[in-house]
């Protein structure tokens, strides 16, 4: 008898769950419509533990909001890239770097448009948010970026094409210095 009393509540629960994510078409037949939440670039930065330093920088210079909309390509430095930059420039923490310098770095690390790695052609010049500075693609030794800072060697793109709702994120092995 107890089995029978549980049957109807379970059947009701299954019915509710089954039709909750359905849409009734004109022909009267319910169809499941999947919803996929694709993260924004800002979400990817916030959710990736290897981008904690980048999140700190973008929040400090008030650019994190920029990556919630529009369409960009971000060459995102990892935590290790920030640590190496701090160490090589005798900084203890990100707070020791001026906001102006951080803003220039982040503008130089961001393209106005979305581009996947297969479209990055040898010698191609990439327009950044810094209107006076471009990046150049070098495929001679893996996928690398050449900066306008002649003291900085090629910067490796270590992980490519993290797709976001509003663009592409590529992880780079060094801070891009304009």
Image: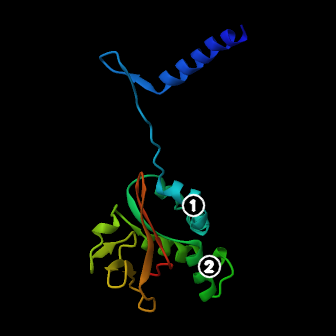
Mark identifier at residue 48? 1
Up-down relation of residue 73 to residue 173 (above or below): above
Q: Check contact, mark 1 vs mark 2: CB within 8 A.
A: no
Neighbourhood count class around disc 1 (C-alpha, 10 Å): few under 14, some 14–19, many 20 upward? few
- Residue situated in front as seen by the camera: 10 or 113: 10
The local secondary structure at tag 2 comes to helix
Comparing marks 1 and 2, which lies closer to the viewer? 1
Up-down relation of residue 91 to residue 56 (above or below): below
Residue carrying label 2: 83
User: For the point 30% across and 16% down, which residue is it?
Assistant: 27
> Residue lying farthest bottom?
151
Question: Does label 1 or label 2 sit earlier along the sequence?
Answer: 1
- Residue 95 position, x and y percent, is 66, 74
Q: Is residue 77 left or right of residue 110?
A: right
- Residue situated in front as seen by the camera: 57 or 168: 168
Does residue 89 appear in this view?
A: no
- Residue 144 position, x and y percent, is 38, 79
User: For the point 38% across and 79% down, which residue is it?
Assistant: 145
- Residue situated in front as seen by the camera: 145 or 23: 23
Disc 1 and disc 2: Cα gap in Å? Answer: 16 Å
Q: Is residue 34 left or right of residue 51?
A: left
- Residue 161 position, x and y percent, is 40, 63
The local secondary structure at tag 1 comes to loop
Neighbourhood count class around disc 2 (C-alpha, 10 Å): few under 14, some 14–19, many 20 upward? some
> Residue lying farthest right?
2
Q: Quadrant of residue 150?
A: bottom left
Task: Identify the coloring.
Answer: rainbow
User: For the point 59% across and 67% down, which residue is it?
Assistant: 50
């Amino acid at each position: 008898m107890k089995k029978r009393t549980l049957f109807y509540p379970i059947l009701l629960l299954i019915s509710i769950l089954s039709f909750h994510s359905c849409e009734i078409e004109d022909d009267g037949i319910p169809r499941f419509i999947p919803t996929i939440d694709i993260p924004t670039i800002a979400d990817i930065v916030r959710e990736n533990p290897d981008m904690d330093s980048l999140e700190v920088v973008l929040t400090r210079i008030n650019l994190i909001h920029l990556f919630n909309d529009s369409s960009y390509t971000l060459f995102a430095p990892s935590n290790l890239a920030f640590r190496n930059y701090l160490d090589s420039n005798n900084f203890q923490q990100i707070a020791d770097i001026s906001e102006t310098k951080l803003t220039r770095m982040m503008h130089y690390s961001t393209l106005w448009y979305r581009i996947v790695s297969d479209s990055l052609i040898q010698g191609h010049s990439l327009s950044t948010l810094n209107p006076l500075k471009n990046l150049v693609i070098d495929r001679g030794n893996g996928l690398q970026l050449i900066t306008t800072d002649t003291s900085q060697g090629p910067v490796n793109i270590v992980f490519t094409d993290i797709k976001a709702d509003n663009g592409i994120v590529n992880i780079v092995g060094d801070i891009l210095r304009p």
